[in-house]
Image (spheres, rainbow, N blue to C red):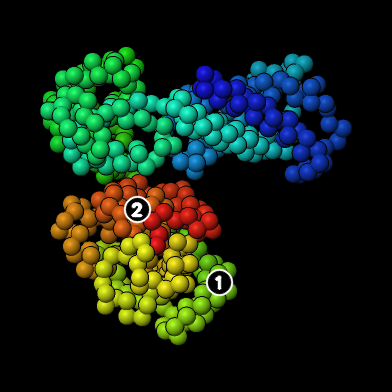
Amino acid sequence: MLLLLQVVIDAAMLVGALVLGYLVRTYIPILSPPVDPPSFMERYLPITIVHTLSVLTVFYFSQMYHLKQGLSRFDNVWRIMQHVSSGTVIAIAVETLAFQNSELQFDYPRGVIVYTWLFSVLLIVVGRELHQQLVMRLQRAQIGRDNVIIVGHNDVTRSIIKNIRDNSKLGYDIVGVVTETGEGKVAKTQVIGMIEDLPTLIDAYNADQVIVAIPDATRKELGYIVSLCQRGRVEIRIYPDNFSFIAGTITVDQLVGLPLLSVRDVALRGWRLSLKRAVDFFGSGVGLVVLSPILLLLAFLVWRHDRGPVFFVQERVGLDGKPFPMIKFRTMIINAEEKARWTVAGDDRVTPIGKFMRPRNLDELPQLFNVFYGQMSLVGPRPEQVNFVEAFNKQYRRYSERHREKAGMTGWAQVNGYRGDTSIEDRLRADLYYVENWSLWLDIQIIIRTIWQTVTGRSPNAY
């Protein structure tokens, strides 16, 4: 029912987009004002029908009606832009071929086409946001949520349970955990049975999804678990082992007839590296000029509090594990580093102006100088202190791999709340996701989310 409602909303928005395109083009012509334009019902009704059906068809075959939990708004907008563009091109082609030399033939102005594309993207984004808000309200009322069974009893299981509980908007209800023994609790979640009980448990709890969280399971063991889950339309998700930190698009290529699994086909190298550096150089330069009044004001407020140093410079680890001097506004008392420890909520070393700046990321603004000089990037894994890096390298597998790219002013881990006194393993997972899946679009997402969190003062775990 909710899926059908989504289709109806999309169709209504597409019709509205073409009507708006027709009207706006009359009052705000892109190239030249229209001369004696025909009425909408007379000439534009056929292309409205074709445009709507074309875009809806592209949406269907692009799985835009397969509702995915956890898809970010940025990814959603990007997908809508891509598929609306494809649908618009198809609609123009169909109109040209099908209506040629007929009473319905009409040369649609470029202005109408451009406006229709623009309004289609905007209105569908709005429509899908309204639909999402409705779904979330229903889910909060325990309507339309997915019942999930988690298989496993380890740190991965606990991490998955925590993520589901912390993100209620995913629409998951954990009905229980399944383990080899079938006893006890995992992360305060009741164990409801053993692995061999899965067929019965799926039916008994009306499960929609089964998440297998056993990263060290053999292929034979996974095959057995999956075979037990083939009950009706239950969805099966498996937490991997070798690919645990590689979450990009997986493609299958061939080498003389032999299938090869490609898990990292695009890396931040060559022209992409030059593009990222150009964005950093331009972005930091513009940022330093535009934000200079704010930088001066913050510098004065820091100095005025205790007449101490304005900046705090500390050696951090960056690209290829090499240290560099990172600069930021001082947010703690003078000589706070003598009490060397991880910053936690309510830290008595933080000054009043520091308490204002840290949740808003304002203390990081001087790092624009680091970015301008090439020591850092606008986006990348956040640099840690040398002593912390040495300890984490010994404790966490693949920790050194986060230094394959430049450290950033902000990163995927930070915008997702993995900062401050949070799990290093979760932070590492987010950093490696960024390193393995870099794209300019991902950088843009992170920058926009960072700006939004800065403006609203809602940076998770920033204290």
In the rendered structure, the answer to whether residue 36 lies left or right of residue 109 reads: right
Furthest residue in direction right, as rendered:
36
Q: Please, is residue 359 above or below residue 295 in the view?
A: above
Q: Residue at x 36, y 81 (%)?
A: 334
Residue 150 visible to the viewer: yes
In the rendered structure, the answer to whether residue 41 lies left or right of residue 411 reads: right
In the rendered structure, the answer to whether residue 459 lies left or right of residue 387 reads: right
| Circle 2: element type | loop
* Percent of width and height locating residue 50: 65, 21
Would you call the spot at circle 2 few (<14 residues within 10 Å), some (14-19), or many (20 or more)? many
Res 192 quadrant in image: top left
Q: Residue at x 26, y 78 (%)?
A: 338
The numbered disc on residue 127 is none
**In this view of the protein, which residue sits in the foreground, 79 or 265?**
79
Q: Residue at x 42, y 84 (%)?
A: 308
**In this view of the protein, which residue sits in the foreground, 319 or 177?**
177
Q: Please, is residue 249 above or below residue 371 in the view?
A: above
Q: Residue at x 58, y 34 (%)?
A: 130
Residue 369 visible to the viewer: no
* Percent of width and height locating residue 164: 34, 37
Furthest residue in direction bottom, as rendered:
307
For badge 1, the amino acid type reads Ile
Lower position in the chain sequence, tag 2 or tag 1: 1
* Percent of width and height locating residue 426: 29, 49
The numbered disc on residue 294 is 1
For badge 2, the amino acid type reads Tyr
Q: Which residue is mark 2?
A: 418
Mark 2 touching mark 1, by CB under 8 A? no
